[in-house]
Amino acid sequence: MAAAGGFATSVPDLKSSTKFTSFSNAPSCYLANFPSRLRVLHTPSKLKTVVYERRVLSLNPRSEAPSGNTILSNDVESKASSVSALQNLKTSAADRYTKERSSIVVVGLNVHTAPVNVREKLSIPEAQWPRAIDELCGLNHIEEAAVLSTCNRMEIYVVALSQHRGVKEVTEWMSKVSGVPVAEICQHQFLLYNKDATRHLFEVSAGLDSVVLGEGQILAQVKQVVNGGQGVPGFGRKISELFKRAITVGKRVRSETKISTGSVSVSSAAVQLALMKISASSYASARVLVVGAGKMGKLVIKHLVAKGCKRMVVVNRTEDKVAAICEELKDVEIVYQPLSELLACTAEADVVFTSTAMETPLFLKEHVQTLPQASSQIGQRLFIDISVPRNVGSCVSDLEAACVYNVDDLKGVIAANKEDRFLKVMEAQEIIEQELKECEAWKESLETVPTMKMLRSRFERITAPELDKCMSKIGNDGSEKIKRAVYALHVGMLKKLLHGPMQHLRCDGSGNRSLNETLENARALNRIYELETEISVLEQKIRAKMEQSQNEMPEYVTILTKSGALVLKETEQMQMSKVFAGKTFHGP
């Protein structure tokens, strides 16, 4: 029977029943009443002892909470067989949740949906990606995660046990680490699920979602997600494979369509924007300052040289990167200055490019307003800021003597090029659809893996006792050689018996079977051998949380499941209270 505020399930024809309630999204006053110790001992035919050490308050107005501080129920006989609390949940209206398949979800903001002042607050430095993955996977409904944070996008890819709960947890986490209110994030974020999320990542890697269509830097950033995720527990099988396939897509699109031919990168667009803002006659005499000699700064320098700039000042924390650039560009005069000389160098510059990883602005209004005027040929001093977070504060644009541009202003520079590459985009989409089809087939084929494992385990459980009987008959009189031969015979027969079923469960392109035929084979084997492959997503999550926890805790709670009893530590009781959202169970 469904009750208000939650779900209630019952097992009929029992001599007595015990009711307990768990909580989700409840006020702290309710969670405080969750029992500090609850132990349920389970045997195949009896439910022996149920002890509550504090009264449990039900969120369900139609449910009755135990009336005493301690309730003791002994030797409760079941007419049929014991049914676990989690099994009851599966057969209830909550079945939709416990059997919900995990989903690939992307929660993101990018240059198309959010302004730079929002993106910069949410950006996560590359060095902090592993920590972010670890924190995301610590959320109740997140199994795997990856972070793709660049100047144009902040996207979080997760494998979520529940789509809606997963999105809610990720959004709240983003708000917590950035300080941006959830409402503001929701105003600018986009959400994509499963196939749409996969297609989006493939388009990102191919450069189709970039401000600069076909630019190559995003592919390098996707590669860095994979490199940085190596060894991080939360960067799991599904997410890892997804990003590896995205890299393949990016390479294919660029090599087969030449979509990047004639296109510009963010750094070259910045140089092109500078040329648009000053006259051709003034460009040769313009005094240029580049702040930052990292990847983006180096590209800016190269594009300036390609456009005819012969002298520039480069401000950087250390000299080694600038020296390496000087070695590469020997025909250009590049003057190095330390970061401490930033304002002095800016006072002598007409055009300033900034591309550092600083998290706080290098230029504020009070800094710039004290600087002397730019040369009369240039007029306003140009600040072209391609950093995220921005290196030039938005308040600088209030000054008449300064003109500030950021990455969002590059859209107009490269708008015309998109039309020229329309046909190449269509070719790229065909490649993406091919790779997407293969990726979806791979994800679906993972459904047969539990069946394979359970089938092997079932055969081993059947044959192991017979092997033991044979070995006991041989006894101590038999030589080790005979025993090894008998064991080898057992292993060989087991492999041959499993070979046929396993071949029909594989979806690796080795046979002519379609994906649907493979999945039907798995379902048939499940029915024939009564394999326990439908362990609920909830139970899998509980087991994973238990394996991750290493610290011993004094308090425990035991919950009955389909495959036995799970012992949870006290710190996990609160997780259980969140997962079992207001659901009421009647013990068997």
Image: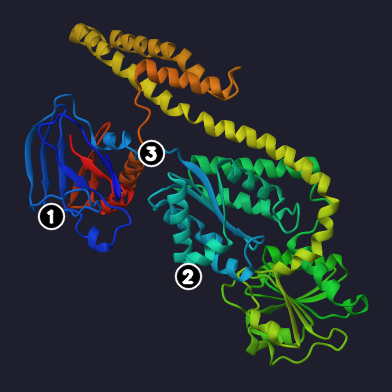
Q: Position of residue 123 (x, y in %)?
A: 56, 64
Vertical comparison of 44 with 421: above or below: above
Q: How many marks?
A: 3
Can residue 310 be seen here? no
Q: Earlier in the sequence, mark 1 or mark 3?
A: 1
Amino acid tagged 3: Val
Amino acid tagged 1: Arg
Residue nearer the viewer, 121 or 182: 182
10 Å crowding of disc 3: few (<14), some (14-19), many (20+): some
Label 3 sits on residue: 537
The mark lying in front, picked from 1 and 3, is 1
Residue nearer the viewer, 470 or 252: 252
Residue nearer the viewer, 65 or 466: 65
Q: Earlier in the sequence, mark 2 or mark 3?
A: 2
Which quadrant does the N terminus fall into? top left
Q: Position of residue 44 (x, y in %)?
A: 17, 27
Label 2 sits on residue: 179
Label 1 sits on residue: 54
